[in-house]
Amino acid sequence: MPPSNQITAAIYARVSTTDKGQDVENQLAQLRRYARAQRWQIREFIDHASGKHSDRAQFKAMFEAASRREFTVVIVWALDRLTREGIGETFAHLKRLHGYGVQFESYSEPQFRTTGPFGSLFAELMIALAAFFAKTERERISERTKAGLATAVAKGKTLGRRWKVFDRARAVQLRKDGVSWREIARELGIGQSTVRHALKSVQQTSPKKRLKR
């Protein structure tokens, strides 16, 4: 726990594969400058997400540290850097921070700062609207993706990896005759891995011939 007269700020950032690296670094630099200008000590919690998947280990660690009163305020670049889960979840996170005696500041959105009287009607309204639009946008992107896939299927496009069509019986016989995987693949015009995968359940039943690798 920091001294009673010393404010420690927790900077939280969530970096995804869709973010521009330089933009994220610029944002972090500005958050650090802002915290130093307030003469605050700094702790950083930074999550790295791949697409929409992330265990948000640092997000969880931040709340655990908050429960131990290890900092006084959480600073993010924008509200959607904290969460895009929706109104209820956003308020739950802020209420949880408030319960730990921790304030919240969105650097680029002064209207989303709870430093000062927490529970301001205007601040709550603006945070609710931002959380709603963030979640709505995420759902809209998901729906567009699903619609695109449905359209592709309707047009006869094959999604995912294409199946390799070849004479399986011929491949089985060649393997039984002791022909190597490489030679079978060359004769059938497919890759060795495709042959091996297709015939992995076929038992080699020719004890008189040694199969080539």
Image (tube, grey):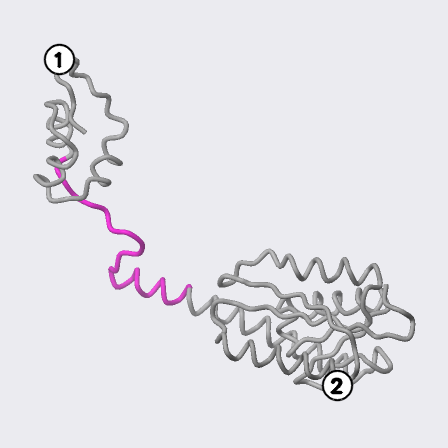
Where is residue 146 shown, x and y percent of the image? 42, 63
Vertical order, 78 against 96 (above or below): below
Tell me, yes or no, whether the highlighted magenta stretch contains residue 166: yes
Where is residue 120 shown, x and y percent of the image? 83, 82
Q: Residues within 10 Å of mark 1 (few under 14, many from 20)?
A: few
Q: Which label is found at residue 37? A: 2
Q: Nearer the viewer, residue 11 or 40?
A: 40
What residue sits 24% from the left and 25% below the top?
A: 202
Q: Quadrant of residue 171?
A: top left
Q: Residue furthest left?
A: 187
Q: Quadrant of residue 91?
A: bottom right
Vertical order, 29 against 51 (above or below): below
Three-letter code for the amino acid on which mark 1 is drawn: Lys
205 displayed left or right of 187: right
204 displayed left or right of 64: left
Q: Which residue is mark 1?
A: 208
**In terms of secondary structure, where does tag 2 sit?**
helix
Where is residue 128 shown, x and y percent of the image? 70, 76
Three-letter code for the amino acid on which mark 2 is drawn: Ala
Vertical order, 13 against 189 (above or below): below
Tell me, yes or no, whether the highlighted magenta stretch contains residue 210: no
Where is residue 162 shown, x and y percent of the image? 24, 51
What residue sits 73% from the left and 80% below the top?
A: 35
Q: Quadrant of residue 10?
A: bottom right
Magenta residues span 146-167
